Image (cartoon, rainbow, N blue to C red):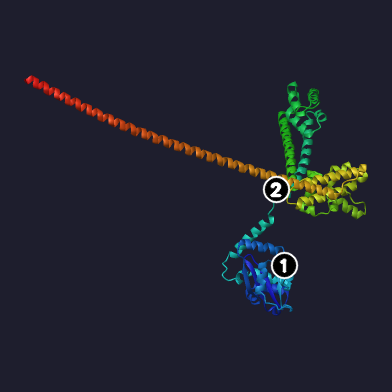
C-alpha cells in the first residue's frame, strides 16, 4: 500500500510520497538513521504537491485549524486534488500519514481517506522537516525561517489574546501578596511593640491596635517630653480623649528605661515603615475588590472578595475553578486532611477554604456540613456564570446569596425557601433590565452628543450668517461712502469752474476800466 505524507509548514501544505519503504523496512531505527542523509532520504521521499498559503492571515487560520484537529476547506481541496482518486465502492490503495492523530481522524471521517500516525510516520515527517528547503524550488535561504517566526508570533498572540479587565492572574498575585502582607505587618508590629516597650511599657495595655500603636510610637518618641501640649495630637490619632489623657498619665509614671536619640530615631523609622505597609495593605485590598468585581462579580457577591479570590488562587484560574464540581470546590484547601482521612479510613473533611465564609460560621454545629455542601453548589454555579458569560453582572450572585440566606432560615426556623427555577428567572430578568438600562444610557449619551454637535453646527451657521450680514453691510457702507465722495468731487469741480468764470469777468472789467482811464488821461 502506497504511503503519502502530509506536512504542514509555515509557508503552505506539502504532500510527499514515500517510495521504497519495503527496501528499508518499517524499522524506526533504520528510518531515524536514514533521515539525516539527504541522498538516501531523497530517494525514499519525494514531493508530490505543494499548496502555498495566500497570506499571513491565511497561514494563521490554517495553523489554528490544524492545532484544533480540524480540516479546512483549503486542505480538503488540496488533498482531493493531489491524492489518487478512488472509485466509489472500492477501498483506497494508499494511506495518508499525518503528525497529529486528531486531524487524521477528522480527515478520515470527512473524506474516507485512511490515515495513520505512528513512530514510523513521525520519523519520516521529521526528515521532511529537516530537508524541507531542499524539496521546495525557488525558495530563498532564510524565507522559511522568517515565515516560521512570523507565524509563531501571530499564533502565540492569538492564543494569549484576552480581555485585560478579566485577567485572573492579577487576582491570584494580589491575594498571595495580601496574605504575605498580613503576616509581615503582624510580625513587624510585634517587633515595634517589643522595641518601644523598653521605653514605654504601659502603652501596650492601653492601645491594642497595631497600626495605632506604631502611629503613637512615632508621634510620642520620648515619653519624658509628652505633656498636655500634645493632647490634641493624641486625640486625633486615638479618636478618644479619655484614652489620650490615660496615655499622658501613664507616660508620667512610666517604669520604662530611657533611650538614646539614635535608638529613638530607629524606632521612629521602623514605626513609619510599619505604617506604610499597613496603608499599602488597605490599598491592595481595595484593588483586589475592584478586580474581583471585574473578573468574578457573582462569586464575589455570593461569598465575598477575599474568599472568592482564595478559591480562584487555589484552583489556579477562574476557568479551572469553573470546571471543578461542587464536591471538589467544597474541600478546596483541605487536601491534606482529605488524604489523611482516606489513609486512616477516618471521617473526611466537610469544608476547606469556604469555611472562612460567614455562612458557615452562622450555621449551627449539626448543619455546618449541609451548609458547606449547599454553599459549594452555589459557588460552582456562580464561578461558571462568571467564567463563561460575556456580560458582567452581579444579579445572579445576589440571587444566589439570597438563596443561601433562605437555606439558613430553613435550617434554623423551618421557613421553606423558594424554588431554584423561580430565583434564576428573576435573576435573568434583573440582568436583562440592567442591559436595557445600559443601552438606554448609551443611547441617551449618543443623543446628547448629537444634540451638542447640532447646536455647535447651528451656532457656527448663525455665526457665518452674522458674519455674511456684517460683510454685506460693510460693503454697502463702502459703496455709499464712495458714492458720496464722487458726488462731493463733482460738486467741488462745478464750484471751481464758476469761480474761474467770475475771476475772468472781473479781470475783463478791470482791463476795460484801465483802458477808459488811459483814454481819459490822453484826452
Q: Is residue 515 left or right of residue 410?
A: left
Depth check, front residue: 168 or 359: 359
Tally the numbered discs: 2
Secondary structure of residue under mark 2: helix
> Residue drawn at (69%, 63%), measured in percent from left and top?
65
Secondary structure of residue under mark 1: helix
Image location (x, y in percent) of residue 45 = 65, 75
Depth check, front residue: 423 or 148: 423
The image shows residue 281, relative to residue 491, as above or below, that is: below
**In what quadrant of the picture does the N terminus appear?**
bottom right
**Label 2 crowd (10 A; few <14 / some 14-19 / many >=20):** few
Would you identify the image quadrant in which residue 71 lies? bottom right
Evaluate if marks 1 and 2 touch, with contact meaning CB atoms under 8 Å apart: no
Image location (x, y in percent) of residue 180 = 77, 43
> Residue drawn at (34%, 34%), measured in percent from left and top?
486
Residue 70 visible? The answer is yes
Image location (x, y in percent) of residue 82 = 65, 74
Q: Which residue is mark 1?
A: 103
Would you identify the image quadrant in which residue 76 lies? bottom right
**Label 1 crowd (10 A; few <14 / some 14-19 / many >=20):** some
Image location (x, y in percent) of residue 22 = 71, 79
Would you identify the image quadrant in which residue 500 lies? top left
Q: Which residue is mark 2?
A: 165
> Residue drawn at (92%, 51%), measured in percent from left and top?
347
Q: Earlier in the sequence, mark 1 or mark 2?
A: 1
Depth check, front residue: 74 or 315: 74
Amino acid at each position: 500500500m502506497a504511503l503519502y505524507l502530509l506536512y504542514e509548514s509555515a509557508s503552505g501544505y506539502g504532500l510527499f510520497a514515500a517510495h521504497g519503504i519495503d527496501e528499508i523496512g518499517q524499522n524506526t531505527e533504520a528510518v531515524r538513521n536514514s533521515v539525516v542523509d539527504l541522498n538516501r532520504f531523497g530517494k525514499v521521499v519525494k514531493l508530490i504537491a505543494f499548496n502555498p498559503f495566500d497570506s499571513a492571515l491565511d497561514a494563521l487560520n490554517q495553523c489554528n485549524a490544524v492545532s484544533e484537529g480540524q480540516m479546512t476547506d483549503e486542505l480538503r481541496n488540496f488533498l482531493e486534488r493531489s491524492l489518487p482518486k478512488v472509485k466509489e465502492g472500492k477501498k483506497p490503495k494508499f494511506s495518508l500519514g499525518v503528525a497529529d492523530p486528531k486531524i487524521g481522524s477528522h480527515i478520515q471521517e470527512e473524506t474516507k481517506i485512511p490515515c495513520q500516525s505512528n513512530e514510523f510516520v513521525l520519523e519520516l515527517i521529521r526528515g521532511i522537516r529537516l530537508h524541507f528547503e531542499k524539496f521546495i524550488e525557488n525558495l530563498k535561504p532564510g524565507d522559511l525561517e522568517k515565515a516560521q517566526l512570523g507565524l509563531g508570533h501571530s499564533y502565540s498572540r492569538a492564543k494569549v489574546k484576552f480581555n485585560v479587565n478579566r485577567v485572573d492572574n492579577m487576582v491570584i498575585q494580589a491575594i498571595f501578596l495580601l496574605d504575605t502582607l498580613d503576616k509581615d505587618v503582624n510580625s513587624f508590629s510585634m517587633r515595634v511593640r517589643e522595641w518601644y516597650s523598653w521605653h514605654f511599657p504601659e502603652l501596650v495595655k492601653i492601645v491594642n491596635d497595631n497600626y495605632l500603636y506604631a502611629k503613637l510610637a512615632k508621634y510620642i518618641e520620648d515619653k519624658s517630653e509628652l505633656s498636655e501640649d500634645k493632647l490634641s495630637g493624641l486625640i486625633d490619632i486615638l479618636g478618644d480623649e479619655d484614652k489620650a489623657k490615660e496615655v499622658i498619665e501613664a507616660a508620667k509614671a512610666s517604669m520604662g528605661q530611657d533611650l538614646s536619640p539614635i535608638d529613638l530615631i530607629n524606632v521612629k523609622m521602623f514605626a513609619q515603615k510599619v505604617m506604610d505597609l499597613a496603608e499599602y495593605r488597605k490599598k491592595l485590598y481595595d484593588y483586589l475588590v475592584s478586580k474581583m468585581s471585574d473578573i468574578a462579580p457573582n462569586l464575589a457577591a455570593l461569598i465575598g472578595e477575599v474568599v472568592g479570590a482564595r478559591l480562584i488562587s487555589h484552583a489556579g484560574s477562574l476557568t479551572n475553578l469553573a470546571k471543578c464540581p461542587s464536591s471538589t470546590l467544597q474541600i478546596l484547601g483541605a487536601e491534606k486532611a482529605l488524604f489523611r482521612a482516606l489513609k486512616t479510613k477516618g471521617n473526611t473533611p466537610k469544608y476547606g477554604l469556604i469555611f472562612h465564609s460567614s455562612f458557615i460560621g452562622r450555621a449551627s454545629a449539626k448543619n455546618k456540613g449541609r451548609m458547606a455542601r449547599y454553599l459549594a453548589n452555589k459557588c460552582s454555579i456562580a464561578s461558571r456564570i462568571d467564567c463563561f458569560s460575556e456580560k458582567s453582572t452581579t444579579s445572579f450572585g445576589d440571587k444566589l446569596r439570597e438563596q443561601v440566606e433562605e437555606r439558613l432560615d430553613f435550617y434554623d426556623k423551618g421557613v421553606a425557601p423558594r424554588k431554584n427555577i423561580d430565583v434564576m428567572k428573576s435573576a435573568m430578568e434583573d440582568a436583562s433590565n440592567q442591559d436595557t438600562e445600559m443601552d438606554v444610557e448609551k443611547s441617551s449619551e449618543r443623543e446628547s452628543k448629537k444634540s451638542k454637535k447640532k447646536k455647535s453646527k447651528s451656532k457656527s451657521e448663525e455665526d457665518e450668517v452674522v458674519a455674511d450680514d456684517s460683510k454685506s453691510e460693510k460693503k454697502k457702507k463702502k459703496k455709499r461712502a464712495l458714492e458720496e465722495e464722487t458726488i462731493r468731487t463733482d460738486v467741488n469741480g462745478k464750484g471751481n469752474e464758476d469761480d474761474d468764470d467770475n475771476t475772468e469777468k472781473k479781470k475783463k472789467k478791470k482791463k476795460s476800466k484801465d483802458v477808459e482811464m488811459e483814454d481819459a488821461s490822453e484826452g
